[in-house]
Image (cartoon, rainbow, N blue to C red):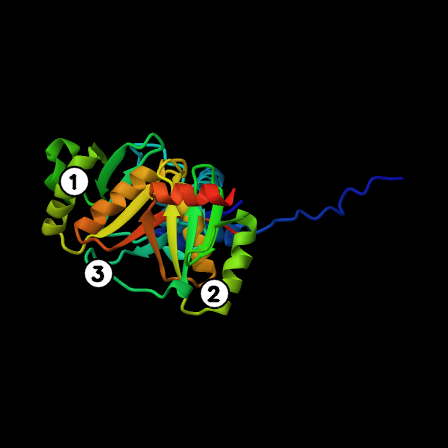
Amino acid sequence: MAGVEIGGGESKNKKQGKKRINIRIDMTPMVDVAFLLLTFFMLTTVFRKPQTLEINLPPKDVEVKIAESNLMTLRVDENMNIYWNMGIEIPKRIKFEDLRKFLREKAAENPKLVVLVKIDRKSKYHAMIDIIDELNLANLTRFSLSPMTEIDKKEMQRAS
Amino acid sequence: MPKIKKGRIPVKIDMTPMVDVAFLLLTFFMLTTQFKPPEEVEIQLPASHSEIKLPESNTMTIVVSEDSKIFLGFDSPYMMENMFGQPNRNRQAIEIKLENLPDLLIKARISNPKLRTIVKGDANAEYGTISDVMDILKKTQITRFAMVTNFKTN
């Protein structure tokens, strides 16, 4: 093990030349403790911080007019069923797994596409995160969230 | 076979470099470790692909728990004391009522205009509550906020 040799470096000893005493300090316990602490800190350190999704809400009293052909409505009911429609078409159901590919295609077809997301109040928060995440992945950054009304619920029933 | 008695060479390994490296790593980990402060509520974060990092200072966190309770917290003890009084100085977040949220948000923004808003919701919280919180944010002119998520790889 690592040790330190300390010569008894006194001037008297040096002159006498032959009376040097070697003091050996056993470093083993210290190194043991150091390794113990090292393992502890290595195991407890968390490098990855949580990520965030940033959202910009539009100011309260700004109205934007959008052409019907550029508007897609995504409706999510409380059981995480997703329905989509363009303009005022009849909603169609889509599986969540197919959503990413579908949104990419739609975004490529029409760069001016605006998505209106309506999520049922009884739905879970992760539904909203999942949908916004998929929209971000498809580069559809122009979307808005609006409350789901009774009319929307009737629209969804028309689809199923 | 006769035993070889004198052919053994004592092998001494110099451990100094290894110990040096060990201490270097130890110092590194000791300095970089940040212990997680005790949380008021256990939050199961939803996952997303976003790669934006969470802001660290000047934050105001609105926590929505799984049973739709709302908590408000600040990263600095000074702000906590300012908003909730001396006894709550070192707490992470305080439970509040939805009706009181707008006033608290406005008060917080007046005492520190640089505050950044973070919404930390449980993955299984009801969307309605989050939607109410977002409405309040909109009404109090906080149009930019971050939602905490875990990183999803697929």
Q: Position of residue B84 (x, y in %)?
A: 13, 36
Disc 3/disc 2 C-alpha distance (Å): 24 Å
Do the numbered discs 3 and 2 sit on residues whose CB atoms are within 8 Å?
A: no
* Identity of the residue drawn at 39% across and 55% down: A14
Question: Does B128 sit left or right of A7 as displayed?
Answer: left
* Identity of the residue drawn at 10% across and 49% down: B111
Looking at the picture, do discs 3 and 2 lie on one chain? yes
Q: For the residue labelled by badge 2, is the local secondary structure a helix, a strand or a loop? A: helix
Res. B76 image quadrant? top left
Residue under numbered circle 2: A107
* Residue B80: mark in rendering: 1
Q: Chain for mark 1?
A: B
Do the numbered discs 1 and 3 sit on residues whose CB atoms are within 8 Å?
A: no
Graded by Cα atoms within 10 Å as few (under 14), some (14 to 19) or many (20 or more), the crowding at tag 3 reads few
Q: Amino acid at mark 2?
A: Ala
Q: Amino acid at mark 3?
A: Val
Please state which of the two labelled residues, at mark 1 or mark 3, is closer to the viewer.
3
Q: Amino acid at mark 1?
A: Met
* Residue A83: mark in rendering: none
* Identity of the residue drawn at 52% across and 42% down: A160
* Identity of the residue drawn at 32% across and 55% down: A55
| Front residue of this view, candidates A41 and B144 | B144
Disc 2/disc 1 C-alpha distance (Å): 44 Å
From what the image shows, is residue A141 above or below residue B63? below
* Residue A62: mark in rendering: 3
Please state which of the two labelled residues, at mark 2 or mark 1, is closer to the viewer.
2
Question: Does A144 sit left or right of A29 as displayed?
Answer: left
